[in-house]
Amino acid sequence: MWNKDEVEGKGKQIKGNIKDKAGEVIGNPDLEAEGEAEHAEGDVQQGFGKARRKVGEAIEDVGEAIGGNR
């Protein structure tokens, strides 16, 4: 299950791609650069969220392993 950072990061990636492509189509390098930056920000946020989720899952697995040994 995705967490908030993963969802928001994916949204920023999509929004950034749209701005990037729109900037290319209309010949606006500022909009294109803004889109590229927003996409990169989304990559980082989504990666952070994924790492956080993986750590949480690992902690749950350890808890289940400990609890199962009783």
Image (cartoon, rainbow, N blue to C red):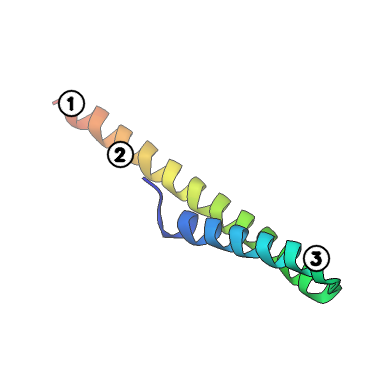
> For residue 58, which quarter of the picture?
top left
Q: Position of residue 51 (x, y in %)?
A: 51, 46
Badge 3 amino acid: Val
Residue visible at 69% across and 59% down in the picture? 40
Q: Name the residue under label 1.
A: 68
Q: Position of residue 16 (x, y in %)?
A: 66, 64
The mark closer to the camera, 3 or 2, is 3
Pick the front one: 11 or 28: 28
Indicate the quadrant containing the C terminus: top left, top right, bottom left or bottom right: top left
Q: Distance between the residues labelled 1 and 2?
A: 12 Å
The mark closer to the camera, 1 or 3, is 3
Q: How far apart are marks 1 and 3 (CA)?
A: 58 Å
Q: Name the residue under label 3.
A: 25
10 displayed left or right of 33: left
Mark 2 and mark 1 in contact (Cβ < 8 Å)? no
Q: Name the residue under label 2.
A: 60
> For residue 68, which quarter of the picture?
top left
Badge 2 amino acid: Glu
Residue visible at 60% across and 58% down in the picture? 14
Indicate the quadrant containing the N terminus: top left, top right, bottom left or bottom right: top left
Closer to the N terminus: mark 3 or mark 2?
3
Badge 1 amino acid: Gly
Q: Which residue lies furthest to the top in this view?
A: 69
51 displayed left or right of 4: right
Instruction: Point out which mark residue 1 bears.
Output: none
Label 2 crowd bin: few (<14), some (14–19), many (20+), radius 10 Å = few
The mark closer to the camera, 1 or 2, is 2
